[in-house]
Image (cartoon, rainbow, N blue to C red):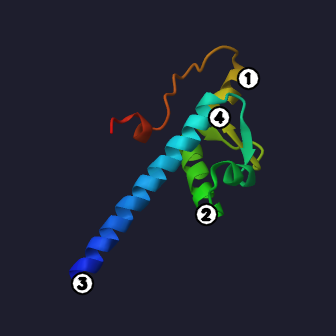
Amino acid sequence: MTHVRGERAILYAVTQDQFHDQVLDCVYSEFLETPGLRLTCRQAQRLWGLDEQTCVAVLTLLVNTSFLSQPSHSTYGRASDERDDVASGSDSQGYRGPSYLRSSR
């Protein structure tokens, strides 16, 4: 039985990782495709149907990768949108999203 439990644990971990990747892809894409989008955590939870813990984890990860920013400590938005406010034009740093989204799958 230990072997079966171990396989289930591995399958669960892989499934959770795949879910996490899908959620990150979805959130990243939405912010990328909607310049100027600003959401509170609660709004993001409703938009993507996420529980609070998952939503906070995803938004925090995207803030930590400098894709999102949280200047008002209540809303999240693309960091490049704020840079564009300072220096008009395109994203001068050429940010292409977090590395985990650029890798081929």
Identify the mark nearer the N-term, 3 or 1: 3
Q: Are marks 2 and 1 in contact (CB under 8 Å)?
A: no
Secondary structure beneath dot 1 equals helix
Q: Mark number for residue 53? A: 2
Q: Mark number for residue 85? A: 1
Identify the mark nearer the N-term, 2 or 3: 3
Under mark 2, the amino acid is: Gln
Labels 3, 1: front one: 3
Who's the residue at 67% across and 26% down the image? Answer: 83
Under mark 4, the amino acid is: Arg
Identify the mark nearer the N-term, 4 or 2: 2
How many other residues sit within 10 Å of disc 4, few (<14), some (14-19) or many (≥20)? many
Who's the residue at 32% across and 65% down the image? Answer: 11
Which residue has dot 4 on it? 78
Which percent across, then down, holds residue 56?
62, 56
Who's the residue at 25% across and 78% down the image? Answer: 4
How many other residues sit within 10 Å of disc 2, few (<14), some (14-19) or many (≥20)? few
Which percent across, then down, holds residue 96?
49, 28
Labels 2, 3: front one: 3
In the image, taking residue 11 as reference, residue 37 lies left or right, namely right
Quadrant of the rendering where the C terminus is positioned: top left
* 3D distance between C-alphas at marks 1 and 4: 11 Å
Secondary structure beneath dot 3 equals helix
Who's the residue at 71% across and 35% down the image? Answer: 37
* 3D distance between C-alphas at marks 3 and 1: 57 Å
- Between 96 and 25, the residue placed more toward the observer is 25
Q: Are marks 4 and 2 in contact (CB under 8 Å)?
A: no
Q: Mark number for residue 2? A: 3
Q: Are marks 2 and 3 in contact (CB under 8 Å)?
A: no
Under mark 1, the amino acid is: Asp
Identify the mark nearer the N-term, 4 or 3: 3
